Image: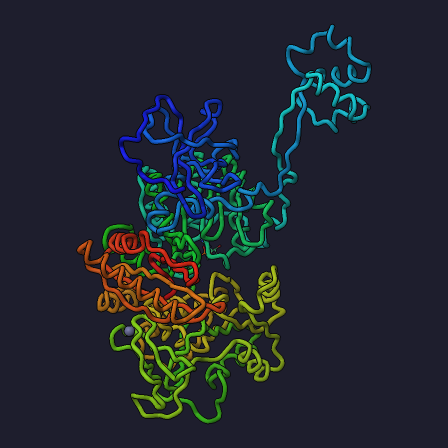
Amino acid sequence: LFETEPPPWELTVQDDVATAKIVFSEAPFGPYDYRIPDEDRDRVKPGMRVRVPLGRRRQPMTGWCIETHLGQVQRSGKLRDIVEILDEEPLCDAHLVRLVSWISHYYQTPMGQVFDTLIPSSVRANAGTRERTYLTPCTGKSDEKAIDSLPKKQQVALRFLIAAGRPMTASELMVHAECTRGPISALQSKGFLEVAVRREMTTGMPMRWAQGDGEEQQTHVLSSEQTTALQRIDAAIDSGKGKTLLLHGVTGSGKTEVYIKAIEHVVRFGRGAIVMVPEISLTPQTRGRFERRFDSVAVLHSQMTPAERHFQWQRIRRGEVQVVVGPRSAVFAPLPRLGLIVIDEEHDASFKQDTQPRYHARKVAHARAMSLGVPLILGSATPSMESWHATATGHAELITMNDRINQRPMPNVELVDLRVRDDRTRGAISRQLHQAVQETLTENGQVILLLNRRGFATTIQCPSCGHVVACPDCDMPLTHHRDGGKAVCHYCDYTIATPPWCPACRYDGIRYGGLGTQKLEVEVKARFPNAKVARMDSDTMRRPGSHQRVLSSFRSGELNILLGTQMIAKGLDFPNVLLVGVINADSALHFPDFRAAERTFQLVTQVAGRTGRGDRGGRVVVQTFSPEHPAIQAASRHDYLQFANDEMVNRRKFNYPPLGSVARIIIRGIVEEVTEAVAEQLLSRLEAARLALGVEVRLLGPAPPPISKLRGKYRFHILLQATEAAILGNTIRRATDSFTIPDKDDVQYVVDIDPMDM
Ligand code: ADP
Ligand code: ZN
């Protein structure tokens, strides 16, 4: 029973009806109108969950109220009634309901599903709470004469409850009045007691992490760069207007200290702040820094129990929390008086969610901050091209901090050209890097070795000259497909037979893909038998707490060498790390993604920032087949400006973001041919929509993405490019509106606006 516009002759007009618009997280998603029963008129509010009949379903469905209306309604037939109200208070205030609506529109996700993302499942499930039944004496019935006529035990119990002057549970009353349940039940059935059900937390918040982690307690005297930065942020806070500020500060320039001072400013006015950091940076160190400086901090992280999460959420909503620190989902923290949003390491890819709604926390934070009129601070040593571009176009204010605290020098970066190898160097580690590790170990310094491996894309690269086989149309490296020996552009589906020798230098030992961390660990242990080595990647870090354990034994000096994936590149601050080695900078550089150079620059810069934190300086050795590549050159000189200028030129050539917008549609199915056929259908609908709207949209594909088969499903994707996201949004909406795929095909598609990993 889908809602459609009824023909006008069937309209009836009803006066003074209270209605609510309800959305659902399953199809059909709504919104549909329901009548609010008269006795509940004051109870139903936007942001609450209700249960309503839907279609022919036997059971009522849970839905979210997004709007209420009182007055005249015009419609055919009878409005169906809301049958149950699930929440006493709205789970979202009006501002957050508007944010849901914005996310739903921008990311093309039904509002019901956005609500389910915004409100944690632990909150929806009331985790860690139980319902308790409280008894109070019924007023009007408790006159002395009536009580005197009751049996003795009932009298005692009732008198006790009246004397107590507060509601009590039956078991409490049984203890105090020294009776069994019998007399209480009797009082209840005779109408002497009123019963109220309340939901309560079963436990308080366990303090699981200790306050402080050694380290400084005192506040710092700000450097002059920090002072200027803070003044500009405070001015934005005081202006009462929404504004984005990009704090571009080299690693160790004291950005966190600036955030803390800005938050103190906000807190003084009785307001709260949200600080987002990449999940991996939610170390006890980070938590400790905020917990020491504010009375009431809520840290959200992935290892919380549902009860803890629910507890924190309630504290935040009640306005008891000054600062919320968490990963991307913290952007939804329901602070009632939000005064500031901070995103640290704003360039980090983890701020983009990779399931529906595929939102970017930066984009959502921006929408939230602007609608509230509060500042958004983006902090990074290597700002995303999006944020950098925003400063150039006047959408964000740029604040720069060029110097490290205490004038510590930036570490020296040495490039090792992997094309020049002598026969004695086998395996992944060059002679130069081997020597550097040896020297560092001798000086009792610690070593971080980074082996970047993203996904399973097998780039085709010549080990002799470093040449990478790429698509002539998109400039993307081609991906080698083992079956059939094909090389495919996964943006536009350009396909050639994989060349048996290097097209540039004719060397016949061309390679596909790279080396794994496990193999590297074996090599490192063999080369440095006396060193204590630990590996950190998604395989070894599966168990909760393992990340923490490795880091603390590295901190304590038990470990000499820490090797791993980009996981180790972020946010760690160990003064005794004197050497960072990047095993192969090219694996990020030649990944088929238009952000590959940006990622490489960020990675090398971030990992370089892990050294030279103490007084003993630090060095960085970067192994690469492409030492002359501008991104690697700029990273080796810590020159963000140079990098950003070069990169902007490249992006402009193909209109890649931030100069234009990109969206992609991923189509997944069990049968390859059927899946591809659906993708082709979608493509022609997109072409038709583009024509009908008269807009310029570049359509690429369908092509196999770098991971063309995932969990038994074939995948294809279609890329869309245009000057603005709104054009892409409208085109996709028009093309997919009423597009249905027969169930028997078993094919699904998802829309990804502003995709981050392509
Ligand atoms: P970033 O976030 O830019 O990498 P941090 O805020 O972590 O930098 O600061 C780096 C180190 O310098 C930290 O140990 C911090 O405690 C310290 N620090 C920050 N500001 C000052 C200051 N004004 N004076 C002295 N030390 C400072
Ligand atoms: Zn191509």
Q: Residue at x 38, y 40 (%)?
A: 31
Residue located farthest toward the top when viewing the structure as drawn = 145
Residue 611, can we see it? no
Q: Quadrant of the N terminus?
A: top left
Instruction: Residue 111: name its quadrant.
Output: top left
Residue toward you, 98 or 242: 98
Position of residue 377 measured from the top left corner of the image (x, y, whole percent): 37, 49
Q: Is residue 662 above or below residue 273?
A: below
Looking at the image, what colour scheme do you see? Answer: rainbow
Instruction: Residue 626: name its quadrant.
Output: bottom left
Q: Quadrant of ligand 2?
A: bottom left
Instruction: Residue 22: name its quadrant.
Output: top left
Residue toward you, 155 or 686: 686
Q: Residue at x 33, y 85 (%)?
A: 497
Left or right: residue 318 versus residue 193 is: left
Q: Is residue 73 above or below residue 400?
A: above
Residue located farthest toward the front when viewing the structure as drawn = 9
Residue 376, can we see it? yes
Position of residue 719 measured from the top left corner of the image (x, y, whole percent): 30, 64
Position of residue 178 measured from the top left corner of the image (x, y, whole percent): 82, 23
Position of residue 387 measured from the top left corner of the image (x, y, whole percent): 31, 56
Q: Quadrant of the C terminus?
A: bottom left
Q: Is residue 58 above or below residue 434?
A: above
Left or right: residue 708 versus residue 647 is: right
